[in-house]
Amino acid sequence: MSVVTGTYKPRVRCYDTYQLSLKFERCLDSEVVTFETLSDDYSKIVFLHNDRYIEFHSQSGFYYKTRIPKFGRDFSYHYPSCDLYFVGASSEVYRLNLEQGRYLNPLQTDAAENNVCDINSVHGLFATGTIEGRVECWDPRTRGRVGVLDCALSSVTADSEINSLPTISALKFNGALTMAVGTSTGQVLLYDLRSDKPLLVKDHQYGLPIKSVHFQDSLDLILSADSRIIKMWNKNSGKIFTSLEPEHDLNDVCLYPSSGMLLTANEAPKMGIYYIPVLGPAPRWCSFLDNLTEELEENPESTVYDDYKFVTKKDLENLGLTHLIGSPFLRAYMHGFFMDIRLYHKVKLMLNPFAYEEYRKDKIRQKIEETRAQRVQLKKLPKVNKELALKLIEEEEEKQKSTWKKKVKSLPNILTDDRFKVMFENPDFQVDEESEEFRLLNPLVSKISEKRKKKLRLLEQQELHGKEEEEEPEGKPSDAESSESSDDEKDWVAEVRKQRRLLQQEEKVKRQEQLREDQQTVLKPQFYEIKAGEEFRSFKDSATKQKLMNKTLEDRLKLEAKNGTLSVSDTTVGSKQLTFTLKKSEQQKKQQEAEKLHRQERKAVRRSAGHLRSRPRRGRPFH
């Protein structure tokens, strides 16, 4: 299990390491200064809060809360007597007995305040670090002080610069006789309890208070951490083993037992987890880390000849070092020799003092080649839509010139996009420049298209001759072309009208040619078969019907337009607009004629009936 506390909001989280998941989360009333688990699992946890309260949590949740007289800073649990020792902003060390459930008489120290404390697990010695830079050791059995260490004077050396009195900020026992003390000025002092002089003083050189100290027994290392860095150094010689500098400030460091894993509490939402295989194996619940490190360390050893340069006999002659053959400076290997890379560079610099100029020219050449590689490079134009591809290449070159000057982000090119790949491969996508829609939508293609066709012919000739580099066709530069194209765009309306007139003239010529062809054709007698169920009226109707069925849709539409049943008009964008008028069938005509005769007969009958009623009867006078 792994227990972590955090702030805003104050809460505690418990993680199940074997399941790599969050087991539970509990919110608290105030921030936690420090905590400790009194059992092997999470069933008994003690929290010391920054508002003088002490909370006891069980497996089910909050269990009990009590208060100490002064603000607490640290506490330790004495297992044989079930006592909790609390130190804080007071000269007294408060004792809370968990078996009796009451406070015992406190320990009276000589310090004004106490910052940290620790209990030796071997012989039960209780030690507290004071604000005056001393460490006081007490025997819990007799409740008497057995010794005092003045660490403030011992931490001051000739090399260190101290602006204030060092206070004790970290304290840790290791075994029966070893103790490590961290000060607020960034020093770590290693003591043997049998002596009042430190065995070793290690300075972090940052001037920040030491937050935590841990012992790593397998390699005889000490891990000391302040808010900025974690240093690992040998406890016998003080030589640095390695160091870690996280991105965020550190609050505490936890070394997983018998492994190479470090867990850090940071000023960030996520904890820092580091795995150093040299310190030990990965824990059982994350053994997959060993497999990852084995894959990373497949070739950890460097080759023997990393710092050597391989040269041939010809190279030695050019360098003037043939007299070194057989000496220790050259090692024979295969068809050449290995020589020290530093010697090689020195000799080459003496022979060629202008090597830097050559290096500079090579760098400039590489930069130019990189910029050329970014351009659109096509060895040959595609088979379909060659003019369109050439137009896109020219536009891309203009874009690159503008982006080189203005540093504008360039957009992807159609030629290199796989989505438009078929447009330059399938002949069905060939642009018909002779169509009516294309000519009306693109009226300003006269001058530009002619120049592009010239360039296209030159490119085709170069492809035939097997030339790889494209030559710019003779004529005006690109700036002149762009200016001319901009002038053409101003006369867009005039060009559209001109294209319309040309299209009308072409249509008129086509109609005259079609009329001549119709006059020249010789009609031959044709036989028609009357299908069963059809009534034969005249040869003329069947012939016209058959002729209409054989004609194309365009001819039928023109015939209907001539009869008045269809009107065709052009839109502004070159498309066609059609209006249909439905024809009446023969049956509808007969029915309308019959209805008309019926109406006329009824009118005649009404007229005759009215005429008879208006006549007076004979033989009877009026009264």
Image (cartoon, helix red, strand yellow):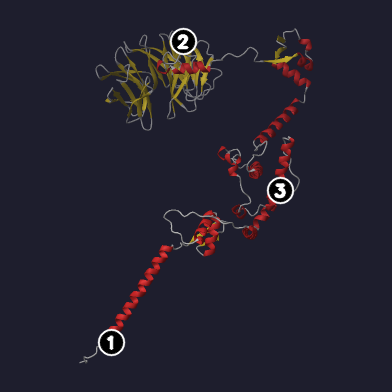
Mark 1 burial class by Cα count in 10 Å: few <14, some 14-19, many 20+: few
Secondary structure, mark 2, is loop
Tell me the quarter of the image containing the N terminus: top left
**Residue 438, image x, y percentages:** 61, 52
**Residue 456, image x, y percentages:** 70, 43
Q: CA distance from mark 3 to mark 1?
A: 98 Å
Q: Earlier in the sequence, mark 3 or mark 1?
A: 3
The outermost residue toward the left is 623
Question: On the image, numbered disc 2 is attached to which residue?
Answer: 218
Residue mark closest to the camera, 3 vs 1: 1
Mark 2 burial class by Cα count in 10 Å: few <14, some 14-19, many 20+: few
**Residue 243, image x, y percentages:** 52, 19
Q: Nearer the viewer, residue 316 or 186?
A: 316
User: Which label was assigned to residue 451?
Assistant: 3
Left-right relation of 553 to 253:
right
Residue mark closest to the camera, 2 vs 1: 1
Residue mark closest to the camera, 2 vs 3: 3
Secondary structure, mark 3, is helix
> Disc 3 residue type?
Lys
Q: Earlier in the sequence, mark 2 or mark 3?
A: 2
> Disc 2 residue type?
Ser
Residue located at (74% from left, 27% from top): 356
Q: Earlier in the sequence, mark 2 or mark 1?
A: 2
